[in-house]
Amino acid sequence: MSNIIGQPITHDTLLKTVNTYPLIDNHAHNLLDSLTSLSCPLEICFSEANGEALQNAIETCALKRGVQQLAKLYNCEATLEAIKNVTDIKSYDELCNICFEPTGIQCLLLDDGLDSLDGLRSVESHVGLVKCAKRIVRIEQIAEQVIGDLAKTFKTSEPEFVVELKSFRDPLIEKFESLANSDLVVSFKSIAAYRTGLNINCNVNDETVAFSLANFVLKCVKSEKQEVRLVDKILIDYILKLAIEIAVKYDIPIQFHTGFGDNDLDLLASNPLYLRELIETYPTAKIVLLHSAYPYTRQAGYLASVYSNVYVDFGLVFPLISATGQQANLKELFEICPSNKILFSTDGHYLPESFYVAVIQVRETLGKVLLESVENKDFTIEEAVKIAKQVMFDNSNKLYKLNLVPEIITNQEHATETFTGVSKFALKNLKYNGVKYVRLGWLDVTNLLRFRVIPIDRFIEYTASRGLTIARCLNALPVYADVVLKGFSPAGEILLKPDLNTIVQLPYHPTHAFVHSLWENKWTPSDAEYDSTSSEPSCFTLCPRVCLKNIIELARKEFGIYFLAGIESEFVLLKNHNNHKPYQPDAVDNTLYSSSASFQNRSTLSTIDEMVEALQNQNIEVEQFHSESSPGQFEIITGPDNPLTAADKVVVTRQTIYDVAAKNCLKATFIPKPFDETAGTAAHIHISVNELDQSKKIYDNHHSKLSRKERSFIAGVLQHLKAIAALTLPTINSYERTADHHWTGKWICWGVENRETPIRVCYRPKEGIKEGMDVNFEFKCVDATANPYIALAALLSAGIDGIKKGLELNMLDCQDDPASLSPEARAKLGITERLPDTLEDSLSELKKDEGLAKSIGEDIIKCFITVKESELDYFKSVSKDKLYQILIDRY
């Protein structure tokens, strides 16, 4: 099965559907008007409590989570006070627009009977925030109006006035029929759970009702209260009978509050199982059980599974319970409830923030639960996509006969936090915070960061959603010059689409922000002809970020594994760039590894401090930093993340190091071997292999003490390492670093905590090797001239190949410097091969390893080889001085 543009349905397709398919909010309440909103505390968005109890809401996970999400929307500090400061200075209408714009709600169905506060906006006034708004009629409120009219008549009439049943029944039926026949009304609703419970008597007789009516009207007459609150069970049961009969007649659903609510609710009496008699008495009535019936979710799901006329809505639990609880709640529904019976709602009320937070939490939770269900083989990926559409839009559209056409969210600016990470309002806040320009960046195959700079207004209004174009050939430029190589055409363009999840203001240059891009094809009228005649690869297959993303997805989908990765940042700080002897640059110091003397130079110390602070301000976790063994050499170690994010972060980290150094009149360089006689500069990659289902992580008595998949992963990398070297050691200078006895590892082998092996097995905490310890693998044959997306793609692809083939790790743990061992000692360990000595040799190995090229992406490997062979040809004709000058300029 394929999606609408002919591409296979994948996990990404599912997540995109969850985050871009429109929503029909099948149960919510009216917003307040501007004036009334001033007296409404923000805490009500996250709690059903009121009065003094509402003060405790600040200690709930629901509010704490909601505060974090609203802080991202409002681009402020993640505190309740900071959010209230934003809402205090902005107009209520502006807040409504800000909150609704990114939700993707196409239609609101509003119960306007929530009368605890005056000043509700009309149903119709919500159009503008959403495309469509319809009314849900609360039947008890209509009955109270009729009884109130009766009570007024009784007060002003003669003493002999008698309250007859028809004086109540006839006007009530008339009102119900008028409402049911209205184009604005799509459903009735009962709050019997609040008043007398859900144990409805379906056989109440007229005589009993007439007696209860007379007594209740009399009480209303004697009461000094102006409003009528209907709490008589006999009358409520009778009202329900009339309402359901009219709902059936006009073929509209009737909603029931079930499960938890305010403190005037008897939770025991709100169990939907009490409705069984009513469900069976009216088999053609369409009955909607609201709020997942929490905590009676399984009971509600059961009723929907065994009765054709019962549906379940899962509002209110978003955002009133924890993320874990929300996932468990939705899973309980999916356990038994048919997917065509499940309806989305926010139960948003009064304030726009309640709608926003509910929506982004629903999309996030639905995506996670459906993905897990696919992994557990409850659904296929195609079925999960269909279910997402049913739950969010299609089921409500059919049930309420709305006849709406789903309007897919096509612009990034309208997607929710879980899809883009940034709303249009947050982009505008970048401008308010001083950003004037946005750098839209991409990393080419030679690992040069390039970007286009767009004025912030243009970015917000156009580029954020539509991207911009560049020449197709720009990913295939060699490091020595911007020249189009043979095999690549200067014709044709690709589209750079900003990945708004990655946008960040640059703290060291706050008028600029940076954002990574994803590449898309730019279609033209001649594309059909172009595609059939051109040998050039598409931009999808040339985008390093897309290649890495696809490999991560494959591992998760096919092998049940996910990865965490971290990339270390080693660099050298130079006082100046000596153009006469670029191979002997002037470093800021000549100290040793982790030497205290490295931080005695105030200029150096302030520069490093500024780098670290800038990284932290860009949400990059810095674990530690220290000096390294070469002159002016430092290392900043950042925290692990998923491989795509880890690569994104190292690109930003390196650019931050470059820019902050330049700001302080220094030059940072990442070239692998800046000095002839000292250790080189690496970019070690750490990877951990993790099972989605931990119960499937198998340990046995293997000598490595690793799980089966971990050692198959390592075996796969070892098998492909000579070819991988072309991608992780991609310059001539790279091979001057990878020498024996220089902390790099030249012999192809692995060792526990051995820094002279290309693959180092690292354990945390370091209490010895034992089952279940936190283990990751450090790959040392990597430097910063390598594109991190391609390097990670190569390592992960090789490891996945090992897992796919079930390769066994026969090579033994090396606990010595392998270069110092005798050939016989190495052979006993299974160490027989060395890494290539030159880039030419590595490229030759890469060409031979067709399986690795295919798993990474044949197009991008072909592009890479073409570029690197061009560089080799060029550098044959230049001096060593010129080579180093170019490399230091570029890296």
Image (spheres, rainbow, N blue to C red):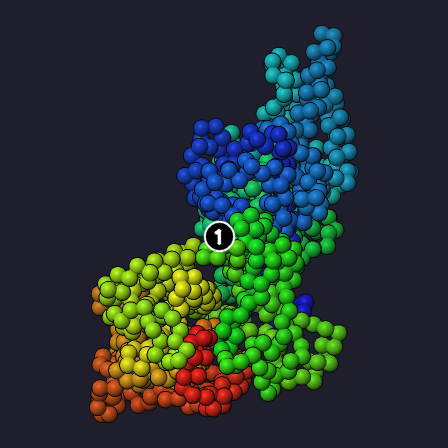
**Residue carrying label 1:** 327
Relative image position of residue 156 (x, y in whole percent)? 73, 10
Q: Toward which corner of the image does residue 774 lie, by quadrant?
A: bottom left
Q: Is residue 107 visible?
A: yes
Viewer-proximal residue among 751 and 536: 536
Report the front residue among 376 and 82. 82
Q: Quadrant of residue 495?
A: bottom right
Q: What amino acid is found at the position of numbered circle 1 in the picture?
A: Gln
Query: Residue at point 48% right, 64% down?
Result: 376
Residue 498, placed above or below residue 36 = below
Q: What residue is shown at x 46% (from left), y 45% (from top)? A: 77
Residue 75 locus on image (x, y percent): 51, 48
Residue 854 screen position, x and y as percent: 52, 82
Residue 635 to residue 532: above or below:
above
Looking at the figure, which quarter contains the N terminus?
Answer: bottom right
Q: Quadrant of the C terminus?
A: bottom left
Q: Which residue is more in the foreground, 615 or 219?
A: 615
Q: Is residue 686 visible?
A: no
Q: Quadrant of residue 565?
A: bottom left
Please indicate whether residue 447 sits to the left or right of residue 771 in the image.
right
